[in-house]
Amino acid sequence: MSDGASSHTPSLFRTRTPHCPYIYDVCCVEFSNNQHHYTRVSLPYYNTKAYNQPMERIDQSYNTHTETEEFTERVSNMELISSLPLDSVIHGDCVEEMKKLPDNCIDMVVTSPPYDTIRDYKGFDFDLHATGEQVHRILKDGGIALMVIQDQTKNFGKSLTSFRTIVDWCDTIGFKLFETVIYKKHGAEGGWWKTRFRVDHEYMPIFLKGERPQYFDKEPLKIPSKHAGKTMTGCATRLTDGRTLTSKKVVINDKKCRGTIWDYTTCGDGTRLKHQHPATFPDKLPYDAIQCFCPPGGIVLDPFLGSGTTALAALEVGRHFIGYDISEEYAALARQRIAEESSTNQFRLTLD
Ligand SMILES: C[S@@+](CC[C@H](N)C(=O)[O-])C[C@H]1O[C@@H](n2cnc3c(N)ncnc32)[C@H](O)[C@@H]1O
């Protein structure tokens, strides 16, 4: 690579992630002002013409040059990234597997742990406290962990697992609670119990590591405004001392912030393959979450991957993924979904 780097023309290199033969990162290395500049051009370079072409590697010799701090950081980032099991589904206990990852290497966690004993997961054990400790350790500063969770009801009482987990992850583990969004389910099959309500929501606590999110883009999540284009009058600001400022006319925008209730249609979501898993979340949910909180090209990890919904969403929006499942059968299902649904473009999102 040193030959290529000493030329003044930027060189493109394709690197292949060690665990996934069909995902490439494209890197650009430029030598100017006596310095190397390394830029990740595209992540992932997935399912494109490059698939069948021979792979080139970045030679480590560029590292021997005197570099700027920024370059050294980029190189160490690249080395860190290449040491991770990117874009792979790993069969194993998520806590034990996460222990193998270095600190501060993951941009975002999106997950849905088993809910108490609501579904039969073949009797596998999971420990949400130990999971939280590892998630906190491996997330980068400003990284987000978004969880979908509900409580089991027994003898007219809720298990409170969701609330306990939120308090534990914040008070003991050290996360901030950025928000708790309600995932409102449309089309949930009726639980027509005579003695209690049908449950048509789940909680989505959004945990933040550090002071502020490293990335936040809510534009792709915006929804149409019901009264777009109309002029609203009487929008007066109330001050803390009780006085009201003179009201102003406001024209309502076409789109508005989605707010803290996210609606998803569960009927018709996913493929026959996906439905082989008993408790999936909608394809669109991780797709929205990842676009909002994970920078392009970043790494999304799901400790409880199930049928692979998070992995497919990450690929769809140009992010890497790492996923674990303790069940060999579900790990195989996730791999099959990734192979079949992302490569044949069957991964269709219900956008309404
Ligand atoms: C609610 S499901 C996740 C479904 C997923 N969100 C989807 O859309 O397909 C939870 C998954 O966690 C897995 N699991 C349970 N205990 C685990 C553990 N200790 N480590 C890793 N995975 C575990 C179960 O096998 C199950 O597939």
Image (cartoon, rainbow, N blue to C red):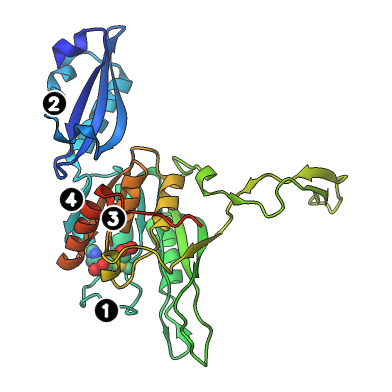
92 vs 183, left or right, is left
Q: CA distance from mark 4 to mark 1?
A: 28 Å
Dot 4 or dot 1: first in sequence order is 4
- Disc 4 residue type? Lys
SS assignment at label 1: loop
Q: Residues within 10 Å of mark 4 (few under 14, many from 20)?
A: few
Residue at the spot x=28%, y=66% of the render?
A: 272
Q: Residues within 10 Å of mark 1 (few under 14, many from 20)?
A: few
Q: Is residue 38 above or below residue 266?
A: above
Dot 2 or dot 3: first in sequence order is 2
Dot 4 or dot 2: first in sequence order is 2
Q: CA distance from mark 1 to mark 3?
A: 25 Å
Q: CA distance from mark 2 to mark 3?
A: 34 Å
Residue at the spot x=27%, y=63% of the render?
A: 307
| Residue position for label 3 | 134
Question: Ligand 1: which quarter?
Answer: bottom left
SS assignment at label 2: loop
The image quadrant that residue 69 belongs to is top left
| Residue position for label 4 | 100
Can you tell which of label 1 and label 3 is closer to the viewer? Answer: 1
Q: CA distance from mark 4 to mark 2?
A: 28 Å
SS assignment at label 3: helix
| Residue position for label 1 | 120
Q: Is residue 208 visible?
A: no
| Residue position for label 2 | 56
Can you tell which of label 4 and label 2 is closer to the viewer? Answer: 2
Dot 4 or dot 3: first in sequence order is 4
Q: Is residue 259 visible?
A: yes
Callout 1–callout 3 Cβ contact below 8 Å: no
- Disc 1 residue type? Asp
Q: CA distance from mark 2 to mark 1?
A: 46 Å
Instruction: Give whichever of 270, 170 is nearer the camera.
Output: 270
